[in-house]
Image (spheres, rainbow, N blue to C red):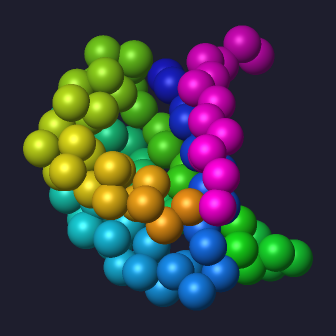
Amino acid sequence: MIKVVAKFFPKEKKIDRVIELARELVEKTVLEEGCIKYEMYQDEKDPKVLLMLEEWESIEFLNSHMSSEHFTRIVPQLSAYMDKEPEISVCKKVL
């Protein structure tokens, strides 16, 4: 099992647009083979921080997702609304 934590830092005035774009990404991704969870959260202390929490059956399914039409179309659009680069951690379970 693979977990991904992607931390995004949208421009303050673009948070709603980022969430709107992410909605389509989530809706299409949860239908993909191998996707267990794909959810976006907003930090309670700092609403300018958004987290995409993902769970995949394997790294192969994650890699397939990253080459999907919706990912390759939407992620570049999201990047245009960021204050800085996202922090992304791809994790495997050890215990």
Q: Quadrant of the C terminus?
A: top right
Q: Residue at x 52, y 80 (%)?
A: 14
Query: Residue 46 location in percent, x, y?
Result: 82, 75
Query: Residue 55 location in percent, x, y?
Result: 48, 39
Q: Residue at x 72, y 13 (%)?
A: 94
Horizontal side of residue 64 vs 40, given as left or right:
left
Query: Residue 61 location in percent, x, y?
Result: 29, 25
Q: Is residue 84 magenta?
A: yes
Q: Is residue 31 visible?
A: no
The stretch in magenta equals 83-95
Q: Residue at x 51, y 25 (%)?
A: 2
Q: Residue at x 26, y 46 (%)?
A: 71
| Quarter-of-image position of residue 91 | top right
Residue 1 position (above or below residue 27):
above
Query: Residue 54 location in percent, x, y?
Result: 49, 44
Horizontal side of residue 10 vs 36, given as left or right:
right
Q: Is residue 29 magenta?
A: no
